[in-house]
Image: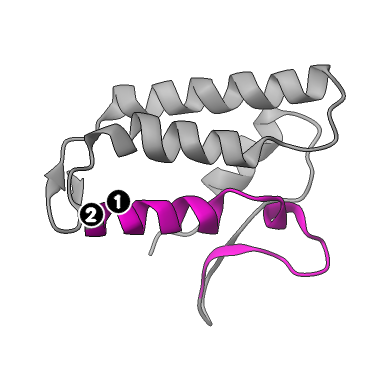
């Protein structure tokens, strides 16, 4: 369960739906040679429609919106200022370098240390 003031019952199928949504939009963006990723649309669909559709508490909605702004944007790919999901003196959870294929990304994820 994920919740701040109210427990919400997000599950594996919620994750899979959002994954499919992201995959569809990002694949379409590449196929159409669009230079910009539709971040505002993705934040809205994931944060307001899918997950946000279950959020009933106004403070929970505010924190969900903050997470969408914090983790969905072009700054994820800024080479001059690397983005870290988490960073301390022992571990850095950042974004991987550009890889040739999905397996390279999976290998990067598998090597991340557990906290």
Does residue 84 lie above or below 38 as drawn? Answer: below
- Quick check: 40 left or right of 62? right
Q: Residue furthest left?
A: 6
Say what secondary structure mark 2 lies in: helix
Return the residue at label 1: 61
Quadrant assignment, res 104: top right
* Residue drawn at point x = 75 percent, y = 29 percent: 101
Residue beneath the point at 83% across and 68% down = 80
Magenta residue check for 66: yes
Instruction: Check whether the beta carbons of the residues at disc 1 and disc 2 lie within 8 A of each other.
Output: yes
Quadrant of the rendering where the N terminus is positioned: top left
Element type at mark 1 = helix
Task: Give x and y (percent) for residue 69.
Answer: 52, 55
Mark 2 crowdedness (10 Å alpha carbons): few <14, some 14-19, many ≥20:
few
Residue 108, percent across and down? 63, 46
Q: Could you give the CA–CA distance between mark 1 and mark 2, rounded to whole angstroms?
A: 5 Å
User: Around disc 1, counting alpha carbons within 10 Å, would you say few (fewer than 14), some (14 to 19), or many (20 or more)?
Assistant: some
Is residue 29 rendered magenta in the image?
no
**Residue 58, numbered circle:** 2
Q: Residue at x 12, y 51 (%)?
A: 6
Q: Which residues are magenta?
A: 59-87
């Amino acid at each position: 369960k994920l919740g701040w003031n109210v427990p919400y019952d997000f599950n594996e199928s919620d994750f899979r739906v959002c994954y499919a949504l992201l995959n569809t939009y990002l694949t379409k963006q590449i196929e159409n040679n669009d230079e910009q990723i539709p971040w505002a649309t993705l934040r809205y669909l994931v944060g307001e429609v899918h997950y946000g559709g279950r959020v009933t508490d106004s403070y929970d909605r505010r924190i969900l919106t903050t997470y969408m702004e914090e983790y969905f944007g072009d700054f994820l790919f800024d080479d001059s200022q690397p983005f870290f999901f988490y960073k301390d003196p022992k571990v850095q959870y950042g974004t991987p370098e550009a890889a040739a294929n999905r397996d390279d990304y999976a290998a990067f994820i598998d090597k991340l240390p557990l906290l």
